[in-house]
């Protein structure tokens, strides 16, 4: 067995000491959207990052759990107060991710920004957190539309930077063999962070990682310095990524990298392939044990396995879903979010 050096041991101790509390003993143990008549934002207030932990305004570790929209250019009708409030009240959802695609979305159709604004306003009114997601995907390199991103996030920060609800996700899934952390993603992130911080000095900013936000170790080896309340995302689909990705996350945490899983699904990474229940619950246990907040993909009725609605269900996007409106993934994820299902319970049921 390889012996740990004194330096390695010291580093691990420092990381643990820097965190804002013992893992699993965080303010959000019950994961409630509303508790004692108070919304999650009323209870937790302005989020902050201490060590590797996301913490509430008092420095207590929290784990935020929520749902993502699908692309707002296709399924933006679900980005409304009725649906968001239903997710809060029935699903126990604490956060909503407004996924604004860039290429094929906002870049050619800036009016899509209205769906983000609607999402923000609805989350402020319902006391939920909102992830403002600049959904880089087909464009691969975030630097391609960096000027547009600066303008977009400057406007959001100017208008909503004083609201505790806001979480900025500045780069969804950078990808491509020529798109690296050092040359593309980190320079982009530093540029967008500077634009946001002119107007919002405090709210959490989440940075994408290479390889469709699957490579947290690149960021862990070369993190963004001299900035507070910065986190890094990891994405996974439980039918495609498992033990190996979890091991990489653990290594990144030991290096001191704060991680937020801003997108994951219970299927293969194609969005289909069935629902992987055992693997999903292994992942949610891992995220809980390591105090990693998460957002599940996604609210849509297109008929894909990762969508939480059946094909063509709730075509008017009003919420108030019955179980027969939900896909297999929808029934499953709803139970997790309502604290009705964990790995131990699932094994007993089987």
Image (cartoon, rainbow, N blue to C red):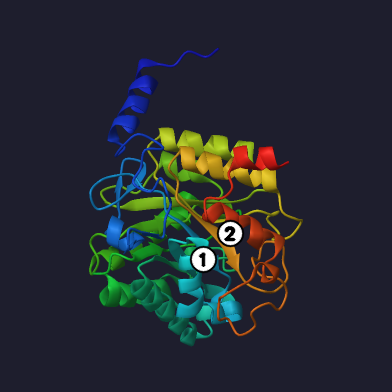
Secondary-structure class at tag 2: helix
- Residue displayed at 29% across by 39% down: 20
**With 176 as the anchor, is 129 left or right in this view?**
left
For disc 1, the neighbor class at 10 Å (few under 14, some 14 to 19, many from 20) is some
Q: Position of residue 107 (x, y in %)?
A: 51, 80
Q: Position of residue 194 (x, y in %)?
A: 28, 63
Nearest the camera: 30 or 130? 30
**Label 2–label 1 contact, CB within 8 A:** yes
Q: Quarter of the image for the N terminus: give it.
A: top right
**With 197 as the anchor, is 288 left or right in this view?**
right
Q: Is residue 143 visible?
A: no
Q: Quarter of the image for the C terminus: give it.
A: top right
Q: CA distance from mark 2 to mark 1?
A: 8 Å
Q: Is residue 3 above or below residue 276?
A: above
Residue named by callout 2: 334
Q: Position of residue 215 (x, y in %)?
A: 54, 46
Q: Residue most toward the front?
A: 36
- Residue displayed at 37% across by 45% down: 223
Nearest the camera: 73 or 43? 43
Residue named by callout 1: 90
- Residue displayed at 65% across by 83% down: 315
């Amino acid at each position: 067995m390889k012996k740990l050096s004194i330096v390695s041991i010291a580093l691990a101790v420092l990381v643990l000491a820097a965190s804002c509390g013992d893992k699993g003993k965080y303010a959000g143990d019950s994961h409630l959207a509303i508790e004692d008549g108070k919304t999650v934002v009323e209870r937790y207030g302005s989020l902050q990052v201490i060590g590797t932990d996301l913490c509430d305004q008092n420095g207590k570790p929290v784990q935020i759990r929520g749902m993502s929209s699908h692309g707002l250019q296709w399924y933006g009708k679900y980005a409304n107060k009725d649906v968001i409030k239903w997710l809060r009240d029935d699903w126990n959802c604490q956060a909503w991710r407004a996924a604004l695609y860039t290429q094929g979305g906002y870049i050619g159709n800036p009016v899509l920004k209205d769906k983000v604004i609607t999402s923000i306003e609805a989350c402020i009114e319902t006391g939920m957190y909102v992830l403002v997601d600049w959904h880089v995907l087909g464009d691969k390199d975030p630097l391609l539309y960096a000027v547009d991103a600066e303008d977009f996030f400057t406007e959001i920060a100017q208008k909503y930077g004083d609201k505790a609800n806001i979480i900025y996700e500045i780069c969804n899934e950078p990808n491509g063999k020529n798109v690296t952390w050092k040359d593309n993603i980190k320079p982009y992130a530093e540029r967008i962070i500077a634009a946001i911080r002119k107007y919002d000095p405090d709210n959490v900013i989440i940075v994408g990682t290479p390889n469709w936000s699957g490579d947290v170790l690149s960021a862990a080896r070369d993190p963004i310095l001299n900035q507070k309340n910065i986190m890094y995302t990891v994405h996974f689909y439980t039918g495609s990524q498992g033990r190996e990705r979890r091991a990489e996350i653990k290594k990144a945490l030991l290096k001191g990298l704060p991680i937020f899983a801003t997108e994951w699904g219970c299927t293969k990474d194609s969005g289909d392939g069935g629902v992987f229940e055992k693997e999903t619950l292994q992942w949610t246990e891992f995220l809980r044990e390591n105090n990693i907040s998460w957002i599940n993909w996604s609210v849509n009725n297109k008929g894909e396995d990762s969508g939480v609605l059946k094909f063509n269900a709730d075509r008017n996007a009003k919420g108030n879903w019955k179980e027969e409106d939900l896909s297999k993934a929808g029934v499953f994820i709803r139970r997790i979010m309502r604290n009705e299902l964990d790995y131990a319970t699932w094994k007993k049921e089987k």
